[in-house]
Amino acid sequence: MIDVTVENFEAEVVAASMSTPVLVDFWAPWCGPCKSLGPVLEKLETDYAGRFRLVKVNSDEEQQLAGAFGIRSIPTCILMMNGQPVDGFMGALPEGKVREFLDKHVPSAEELVAEEAEEEALDALADGDPQTALEKLQHAVATDPANDDARFDYVKLLLQLGRTDDAKVAFAPVIGKTALVRRFDALQRWMDAIDFEAPQGQPARTLAEFDAKIAANKRDFEARFQRAQCLMAQRQWTAAMDELLEILMRDPGWSDGLARKAYIAILEIIEPPKAKVADGQIPPQDPTVATYRRRLSSVILS
């Protein structure tokens, strides 16, 4: 718990709420209900172990802040998230009701553990340690099965390591989301490409066979798409997108936009995690992803 004034409000409330929910308690020393609510809030801040921060504003001494929030009676609590007020309550609520209020907004303990594990996994990948990253992601998914970001990264890494069967098992709980979540759709299309390529035999000979078909008929879009699938399975991403662009330049709507959907899937797969930057700065774009996004736009808009 920390006392907040006009001078430190920006740092302790607005900036802090960008990463952790901040509960602002407007109170006054003469207020009886405030004295009963205060210990409840302090106990909950301890119980929630970092899932939210508690700050207190003496509304008598900080009338400018009280006025800015339209405080008409105390105690009044305002929850700040991402720099903005999102909810609040008035009066000395019992502990159970305050818990209900908090649980509507603050992340669960499992969510925080999963988020931390995912960050550690991305750091391990950046350090060239995929095995540690895989263990961290597996832990994140097991701890918080609803964490779609961790599941995407976990399935993607399994596929990169050639563990296709394990990837399919990990993907199964969210297979129904492929029509709603673009990144899951991308993983499904990658696995479909792997399944297509697996029985084809020797990769080099298979690509040569598709090359012969395309040489005989440049509008053999089926052969071009299948060639792109083989390239996807082999993780030759730019070559696969180049092949898909050949289809898009000749017939953008071929097979209900199948080439465009596969192209977008590859962009989702190869886009690296956003780099950490200082507040207010824009993370740098991956040059390959940026180039191929522009190429897709130029073809679609031409």
Image (tube, rainbow, N blue to C red):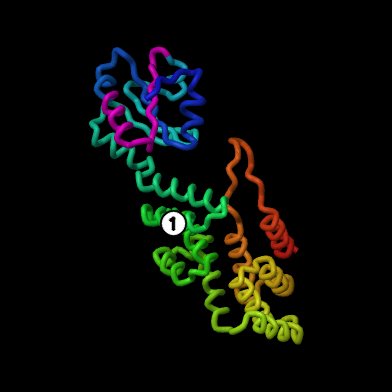
The vertical placement of 75 against 219, above or below, is above
Q: Amino acid at mark 1?
A: Glu
Q: Nearer the viewer, residue 20 or 236?
A: 236
Residue at 62% of width from left, 76% of height from top? Answer: 230
The vertical placement of 129 against 19, above or below, is below
Residue at 48% of width from left, 31% of height from top? Answer: 16
Q: Position of residue 208 (x, y in %)?
A: 70, 83
Mark 1 lies on residue:
135
Q: Which residues are magenta?
A: 38-61
**Quarter occupied by residue 104:** top left
Q: Is residue 59 in the magenta section?
A: yes
Count of numbered circles on the image: 1
Position of the N terminus, as image quadrant, is top left
Q: Is residue 20 visible in the rendered structure shown here?
A: yes
Q: Is residue 257 visible in the rendered structure shown here?
A: no
**Quarter occupied by residue 278:** top right
Residue density around tag 1, few if under 14, some if 14–19, many if 20 or more, within 10 Å: some
Secondary element under disc 1, as helix, strand or loop, is helix
Q: Is residue 145 left or right of residue 258?
A: left
Q: Position of residue 116 (x, y in %)?
A: 44, 46
Q: Position of residue 179 (x, y in %)?
A: 49, 65
